[in-house]
Image: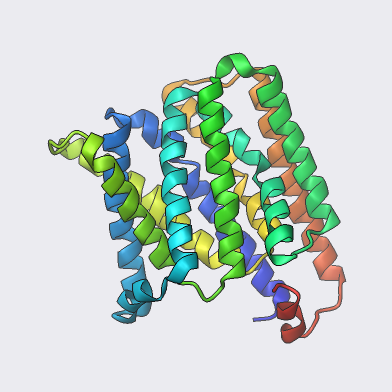
Amino acid sequence: MNPAAQHRLGLVLVTGSAIAWSTAGYFTRLIALDNWTLLFWRGVFAAIGILVFMLATDGRKALGQFAALGAPGWLFALVSGAGMVAYITSLTLTTVAHVAIIYGIVPFVAAGLSWLVIREKPARMAILASAVALAGVVVMVGTGAREGSMLGDFLAFLMTLGMAVMMVISRRHRAMPILAAACLSAVLSAAVCWPLAQHQLPNHGQLAELALFGLINSAVGISLFTLGSRMIPAIESALIGSLDAPLAPVWVWLAFGERPGLNTILGGVLVFGAVLAHVALGSRSRAAAPVAPLGAAESGLD
């Protein structure tokens, strides 16, 4: 696959992961269980879904990936598990719109970390689009703080920081079996939440909702992100992934009438517009540029 086609595929896959991840607020509002029980069952079904995907794509070899995790894989799993606990908890303390749009600063965080850790210099267009996305977050949080809570917003920021770290780890250690790390993360998060969760079995309806939550939001999201994030720079993965921001409050608004305020809507429009402009202008630039040999393109990503 030539670099341009690989880049386009990466954009599509990461966009799909953002759509899957944007359903977290919807499921959190939908399922009438406490935070720890919700996290436990989400982790269980997420681990099952990811493991099934691994077995479907790699057969029995998939099980050997757990032995090859190494330090980067364990770090990814720990950061991912902690980030998920912070994420779901933040959704119970502040509005879905606040949590989602705070995620809009992840391109800046990912760009800074990727430059410090792997010396990946972000393109000027990506930096400009990220600046617009950050402006959207400032509009939302700075002028609409009455909609949320400081603790909820802080936990959302911790989740954002964790996501940026995961992006850089994935980009830096491309041989790392990231799906095995994601599966381990789900298991760890479930294990941590088990002592505080309700131990009685949820009813059939809730089990079905929990299964959809774990499979769609986690298993599908991480699988698509895993494949796509290795095809595009970290700042672009973060920028496209920030589509989660304007999409998440839409599902909650349509389903539960949790209407975001004007400032939150304006912030979401800025984030969404920045992503669309970057994709449109970036695709045009790549189409006009000569295609480099595959080896040269790959060497510039390391």
Q: Which sits in the foreground, 204 or 192?
A: 192
Residue drawn where x is 55% and y is 50% of the image: 163
Residue found at the very far top of the displayed protein:
146
Task: Please provide percent x and percent y for residue 44.
Answer: 27, 51
Please, is residue 268 above or below residue 12 in the view?
above
Q: Quadrant of residue 142?
A: top right
Please, is residue 141 above or below residue 174 in the view?
above
Please, is residue 92 above or below residue 209 in the view?
above
Residue found at the very far left of the displayed protein:
200
Task: Please provide percent x and percent y for residue 158.
Answer: 54, 39
Residue found at the very far front of the displayed protein:
71
Task: Please provide percent x and percent y for residue 103.
Answer: 60, 39
Query: Relative to 125, is 160 on the left or the right?
Result: left
Q: Quadrant of residue 78?
A: bottom left
Task: Please provide percent x and percent y for residue 154.
Answer: 56, 30
Q: Quadrant of residue 123?
A: bottom right
Q: How many marks?
A: 0
Q: Is residue 247 visible in the rendered structure shown here?
A: no
Residue drawn where x is 72% and y is 84% of the image: 294
